[in-house]
Image (cartoon, rainbow, N blue to C red):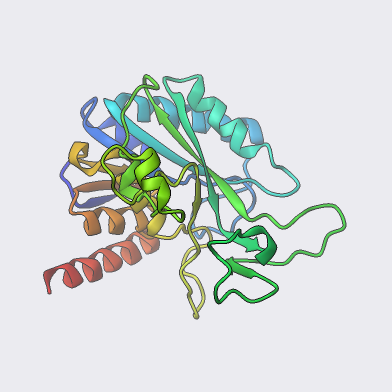
Amino acid sequence: MNEPGVIHLCDCITGMNRLPAGSVDVIVTSPPYNIGKPYTTYDDTVPRNGYLLWMEDVARASARVLSDAGSFYLNVGGSLKDPWIPMDVAMQFRNNGFVLQNMIHWIKSIALPKADMGRFYTSGIPENGVAVGHYKPINSLRFHNDCHEFIFHFTKTGEVPIDRLATGVPYQDKSNVKRWVKKKQDLRDRGNTWFIPYETIREERPHPAVFPVRLPEMCILDHGTDRCGLVMDPFMGIGSTAVAAVRLGIPFIGFEIDEGYKKIAEERIAAELSIRSL
């Protein structure tokens, strides 16, 4: 059942129950948020208690298949009217075998006024600064635009080492290389705020809640590719986690209940494999 490079057409609980215990090193996934997204198969409007009980089942099954030194990166967002969804979901995992080792913020859009950028950023920057990323305006007198989601990094012990520099960024002030870095390399931990913009898609999106490939790619890198023999996505959707695993040369397994999404995922995987074979 744990043959790498396969997406199985079944629900994730059934799929994970067929996997050997401790056989997965990294889980990266984004379950439905239960906010009414128009999936073609799944009903995203189930009662809250039923939804959270389902997330509890997912947590238990995930804890069984994840290795003791593995990482689970859980991407969850909410809605402006119901911002507690991510925390409520995270609690199901906290209560069922997981320790929250890192809380990462996926920044989808950010505005940077020039006055706030400091002396290293002023060259070539417009006077009004820059605004980058996916920004969807809302018509509200109560809420700010929602420009981030959570990535909860769960482990079983809270003591799993990570590869912080695998997604590192260069120092802006190069004097810090000599001041702080033992190996004198121009690279620092980017921290727990990850700016990952959506990929531009001109045509209609084939899935209502897909995350960019860069997100699971960064999660896998963060855990450490040298300690990753199998990546799993219980809610594979159209295959972003699988594509990321292919890019990094790591076997994957996933589960998806929608045959149409599975077909798109397999097409994306095939396209990525063809690029890697050139």
Quarter of the image with the N terminus is top left
Taking depth in this image into account, of 33 and 155 the one nearest to the observer is: 155
Which residue is at a point 31% across and 29% down the rendered structure image? Answer: 161
Q: Is residue 130 left or right of residue 266?
A: right
Quarter of the image with the C terminus is bottom left
In the rendered image, residue 199, in percent from the top left (x then y), is placed at 46, 69
Taking depth in this image into account, of 125 and 208 the one nearest to the observer is: 125
Q: Up-down: is 163 above or below 195?
A: above
In the rendered image, residue 99, in percent from the top left (x then y), is placed at 44, 22
Res 129 quadrant in image: bottom right
Can residue 164 be seen in this snapshot? yes
Q: Residue furthest right?
A: 141
Q: Up-down: is 125 above or below 29?
A: below
In the rendered image, residue 276, in percent from the top left (x then y), is placed at 16, 67
In the rendered image, residue 106, in percent from the top left (x then y), is placed at 52, 50
Which residue is at a point 67% across and 54% down the rendered structure image? Answer: 146
